[in-house]
Image: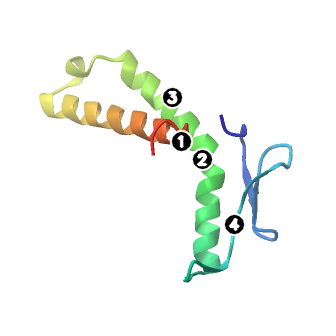
Amino acid sequence: MWTPGPWVYDDTWGLVAGPEGEEVAAIHVGQIEGRRVDRSTANANATLIAAAPDMAEALEAALAVFMAEADEALGSPAQAARRVTAKRAIRSALAKARGETK
């Protein structure tokens, strides 16, 4: 399992850190495998990485709500289909975050 959140990004050092200051990720600006990564892209990537624990928690909460409600009881067949699609997407994203899929 990953380092518990919250995570914060320190753009001075290019590090995403956990609540005890432990390094979670180092963000590189410059040339990577022949491709230039500029500071704004690196900062956007780091901000997304730092939000990961919060997003995973939000997805778990949303999935719990979806699972507690019957799809068919909440509207039209089209709405039920969208809920099923959303549940699949949430499960897939969480599985990827846990390293269960690639």
Q: Are marks 3 and 2 in contact (CB under 8 Å)?
A: no
Residue that carries the numbered disc 3 in the rendered image: 61
Q: Residues within 10 Å of mark 3 (few under 14, many from 20)?
A: few
Type of the residue with mark 3? Ala
Q: CA distance from mark 2 to mark 4?
A: 15 Å
* Circle 4: residue type: Ile
Report helix, strand or loop for mark 1: helix
User: Considering the numbered disc 3 on the image, is that residue within a helix, a strand or a loop?
Assistant: helix
Dot placed on the residue nearer the N-terminal end, 4 or 3: 4
- Cα distance in 3D space between marks 4 and 3: 29 Å
- Residue found at x 48% / y 41%: 96
Name the N-terminal-most of marks 3 and 2: 2
Q: In the image, which disc is placed on residue 52?
A: 2
Q: Look at discs 3 and 1 and give the one toward the viewer.
A: 1
Q: Amino acid at mark 2?
A: Ala
* The N terminus lies in quadrant: top right
Secondary structure, mark 4, is loop
Q: CA distance from mark 3 to mark 1?
A: 15 Å
**CA gap, disc 4 to disc 1?**
19 Å
